[in-house]
Amino acid sequence: MTDNVAIRIQEADFDIASEISALTAQRSDVGAVVSFTGLCRGSEDGAAIAALTLEHYPGMAEAEIARHADAAMSRWPLSGIRVVHRVGRITPGENIVLVVTASKHRQAAFEAAEFMMDYLKANAPFWKRVEAPGGTKWIEARDHDDTAAARWTRS
């Protein structure tokens, strides 16, 4: 894994400010930090939900996310990337995922963060199950997530 790339998958919540601080500590080359935090919504396709349960394949998920983070580090002039993704039961309003990118300039940081989130939504090895008043169901992949991820494919 490239220097200054950190990937964690965990059940516990995370502190956004602490993650940003860890990425930028002792760095004088950082001029831009972009962060994206994904939260659990209280509804899915218009129906109320009680929680999401996220599962992953331990080891493989971290390796795949790291591979994409390394690709981002190669593609843009970044100072670093942090990705924290939660698993387990998550209720509405709670954090699910955090992507933080740092660079000398904002465009690289924005593009790299968007690249990482598009990958996480479309291709990362996570599975989501929704708990609703009528029961539980697995969330299927969405075409718009695949379309968003495909725009980063180099021809």
Image: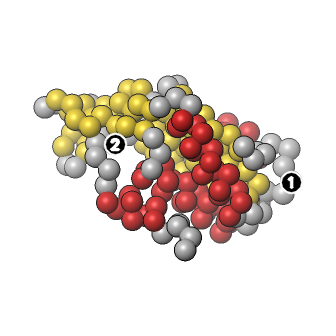
Q: Quadrant of the C terminus?
A: bottom right
Instruction: Please state which of residues 97 and 21 is positioned toward the viewer in this rendering.
Output: 97
Which residue is under mark 1? 28
- Compared across the picture, whether 100 is left or right of 2 comes to left
- Which tag, 1 or 2, sits closer to the chain's start? 1
Q: Is residue 113 above or below residue 91?
A: below
* Residue pictured at 84% horizontal, 49% vertical: 27
How did the renderer colour the structure? secondary structure
Residue 21 visible in the displayed image: no
Q: Specify the quadrant of the image occupied by residue 47.
A: top left
- Neighbor class of circle 1 (other Cα within 10 Å; few <14, some 14-19, many 20+) is few
Q: Is residue 19 above or below residue 111?
A: above
Q: Report the disc number at residue 56.
A: none
Between the residue at mark 1 and the residue at mark 2, the CA separation in whole angstroms equals 37 Å
Q: Label 1, secondary structure: give it.
A: loop
Q: Label 2, secondary structure: give it.
A: loop
- Compared across the picture, whether 19 is left or right of 61 comes to right
Q: Specify the quadrant of the image occupied by residue 107.
A: bottom right
* Residue pictured at 66% horizontal, 61% vertical: 109
Residue 98 visible in the displayed image: yes
* Residue placed furthest toward the front: 155
| Mark 2: amino acid | Arg
* Residue pictured at 55% horizontal, 54% vertical: 116
| Mark 1: amino acid | Ser
Count of numbered circles on the image: 2
On the image, the x and y values in percent for residue 20 come to 68, 44
Which residue is under mark 2? 41
On the image, the x and y values in percent for residue 143 come to 31, 60
Q: Quadrant of the N terminus?
A: top right
* Residue pictured at 16% horizontal, 29% vertical: 135
- Neighbor class of circle 2 (other Cα within 10 Å; few <14, some 14-19, many 20+) is some
